[in-house]
Image (cartoon, rainbow, N blue to C red):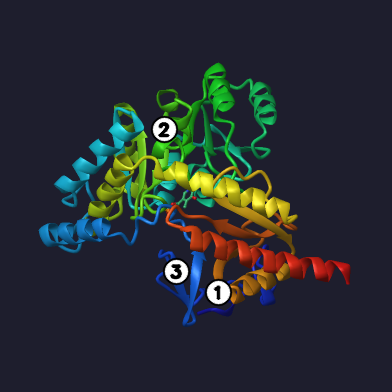
Amino acid sequence: MHNSTLQTFPGDPPVEELRSIPEIDHGPDLYLQYRGQRLLNLASNNYLGLAGSQSMKKAALQAVEKFGASSGASRLISGNYSLYTRLEETLCRFKETQASLVFGSGYAANLGILSALAHRKCLIFSDRLNHASIIDGIILSRATHIRYRHADVEHLSYLLQKQSSQAPKILITDTVFSMDGDRASLIDIVELCKKHKVMSIVDEAHATGVLGRGKGLAGELGLNREIDLHMGTFSKALGSYGGYAACSRAIRELLVNRARSFIYSTSLPPAVTGACLEGLQQVLKNPEQGRKLLDIARDFRSFLQNLGFDTLRSTTQIIPVIMHSSTKTLQAQKELMQSGIYVAAVRPPTVPAGSARLRLSLRADMGDKEIEMARQALINLSCRKFNNERR
Ligand SMILES: *Cc1c(COP(=O)(O)O)cnc(C)c1O
């Protein structure tokens, strides 16, 4: 390798803050293993605890028995199979759309959707805190990227009014923001899109399975039919893997013909597709699990706020606990491990400078014992913080 490949790029963190892969086992389970230690897992996106359930394992195994370990090709060649059709039919009933299309991952879905629907003469309006896969999709599309301040509908309205150009316009927003745990003002956003003739796309990665009896924020607000494309992932609350777009038949056809991350990539293996279908069916069968999780989260948030922690404007199962500096965040993560719980330490550039934080992902399979454990761990942390501040 030529040495210049290893040179520092602009934006790289200092050496002492380099990322590394933690030594974790059983990452989706309620208790994970970290360097041999058993810790309550408040770091995964397996919000409903579906990933390790018997029914999901069984669905994956049955699909392997019937179809084997791989799909063998892209879906447009010979990689299609009947489970795919069933999955997409179930998905469009769930999202109340005419059609749907499954992608290799949520990341691949955003890349494919945005580069297929936008070209270099388009304008894409995007919340400043949208997920990295959305930003990469916009870059790949070569459209003009117009960022509005996070969750600021007035700023969005101002930017839309300022644009007199006849260029095609697209708006895309996370519905639940992955690092702040707050929600997009979807009612106002949809209204603005209609007024300004903007195509609307929502990314429901963290909302699917949780909000709106599992249907996401659009479902909760009764907006399913008002939005042009619903994007999401099977890899979070739904306990499997893979991304999707739920939309009109016309948009689906366009994606099948233009989305390169769909066309030029092998389709999902049967084990994964089988688990996706089962995850979706579980949410349809038990739609109140999301509500239960949101209730746990609401109580936990007020508990944290009473301890004096800043949880930003979270209203969901994702709860940031602001520590400001990266050093403090890593220290707090370590202290919580000593109390038996594992949480994510999120630092710049994933979040803005000065807003390094712990990120708690609560889960519907927490019982009273786990909730009490988590409370005690955060009480310990707040005592130490208070003592340090007094000194
Ligand atoms: C996780 C996530 C994705 C990517 O989904 P994967 O299936 O993990 O690739 C896309 N958008 C948002 C908002 C996410 O949180």
Q: Which residue carries the number 1 mark?
A: 20
Residue farthest to the top, as pictured:
195
Q: CA distance from mark 3 to mark 1?
A: 21 Å
Residue plotted at (60% across, 73% down): 339
Q: Earlier in the sequence, mark 3 or mark 1?
A: 1
Residue type at numbered disc 3:
Tyr
Mark 2 neighbour class, 10 Å CA radius: few under 14, some 14 to 19, many 20 or more:
many
Q: Which element is circle 2 on?
A: strand
Assess mark 1: CB under 8 A from ligand 1?
no
Secondary structure type for disc 1? loop
Name the foreground residue: 197 vs 69: 69
Residue 91 lies in what quarter of the image? Answer: top left
Q: Of the residues shown, which amino acid type is indicated by label 2? A: Leu
Q: Position of residue 115 (x, y in %)?
A: 44, 41
Mark 3 or 1: in front is 3
- Mark 2 to mark 3: distance in Å? 36 Å
Query: Which residue type does callout 1 highlight?
Result: Ser
Q: Position of residue 9 (x, y in %)?
A: 64, 67
* Residue at which label 3 appears: 31
Of the image marks 2 and 3, the number of the one nearer the N terminus: 3
Please state the horizontal and vertical placement of residue 60, each as a whole percent of the image. Answer: 22, 59
Q: Which mark is residue 229?
A: 2
Q: Is residue 43 left or right of residue 15?
A: left
Residue drawn where x is 24% and y is 56% of the image: 55
